[in-house]
Image: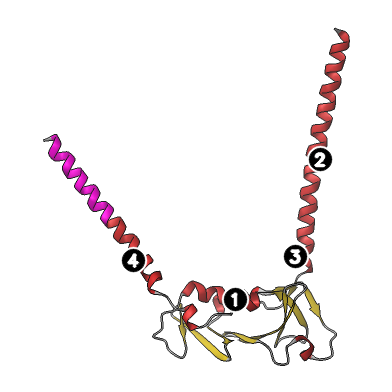
Amino acid sequence: MKKQKKQLIALCILLLICIVAWVGLTKWNKSQEQKKQEEEEASKVTVTDVNTEDVNAFSYQYNNETLSFVKEDDTWYYEADKSISLDQDTMETLIATTAQLTAEQEIKDYEDLSEYGLETPSNTITLTTGDGTTTLLIGNKNDMLSQYYVKTNQSDSIYLAGSAVYTTYQKGIADLTVTESTEKSATEQPEETEEADTLQDGDTESTTEIAE
């Protein structure tokens, strides 16, 4: 009996040790993950730092054509034809992609911009605020990292940024325009609600008639 009691106590102590070790290991893993995230954030280099709300005009190139946009009364317009209705959410996404861009690598020592495709960039993006215009050049893709070489007019450095800085701007005016399906989906919901209310009212009237 005493032997069994001692074994039970030993098992309880062992279980307690395992629990303490597991809790300690969990906390250590979390602290390591947090430390890694902090190191990654600290290692990132700021490429552009523009407040998206301050941007009142921007442009980019698509199919060898420069598309320019202006913001008036909190609404974005295509400068060449303001009658075109633009998808405002898409416009905000375009701006946010490059307004506060960060990079994982900064290249300060280089011989020629052409080595990175920045002599004749694949795209030139501009963001204009009341303080001036920020220009971002998009160069070659680094196939190994799936990132793009970029450069701004505010620095001599070349940066290696995520692929979104290139892919997000592969849109023509047709891709930025509010489509009929978008407008239809925006107007269908109230109609469906109204129809549901009508049916509900009809059911109520029918119930009242039966009760009478």
Q: Residue furthest front?
A: 143
* Disc assigned to residue 187: 4
Alpha carbons under labels 3 and 2: distance apart: 26 Å
| Residue 8 image position (x, y, % from top left) | 83, 17
For the residues bearing labels 3 and 2, Cβ distance under 8 angstroms? no
- The amino acid beneath tag 3 is Glu
Identify the element where label 2 is drawn: helix
Alpha carbons under labels 4 and 3: distance apart: 43 Å
Mark 2 = which residue?
24
Query: In the visual, does 6 lie left or right of 166?
Result: right
- The amino acid beneath tag 1 is Thr
| Residue 167 image position (x, y, % from top left) | 62, 76
- The amino acid beneath tag 4 is Thr
Mark 1 = which residue?
168
- The amino acid beneath tag 2 is Gly
Residue at coordinates 56% horizontally, 78% vertically from top-left?
Answer: 54
Identify the element where label 3 is drawn: helix
Q: Is most of the magenta stretch helix, strand or loop?
A: helix
Residue at coordinates 79% horizontally, 58% vertically from top-left?
Answer: 36
Q: For label 1, count other residues whose C-alpha is less than 10 Å away and answer few (under 14), some (14-19) or many (20+).
A: some
**Range of the magenta residues?**
195-211
Residue at coordinates 41% horizontally, 80% vertically from top-left?
Answer: 85
Q: For label 3, count other residues whose C-alpha is less than 10 Å away and answer few (under 14), some (14-19) or many (20+).
A: few
Q: Which sits earlier in the primary sequence, circle 4 or circle 3?
A: 3
Alpha carbons under labels 3 and 1: distance apart: 23 Å
Identify the element where label 1 is drawn: loop
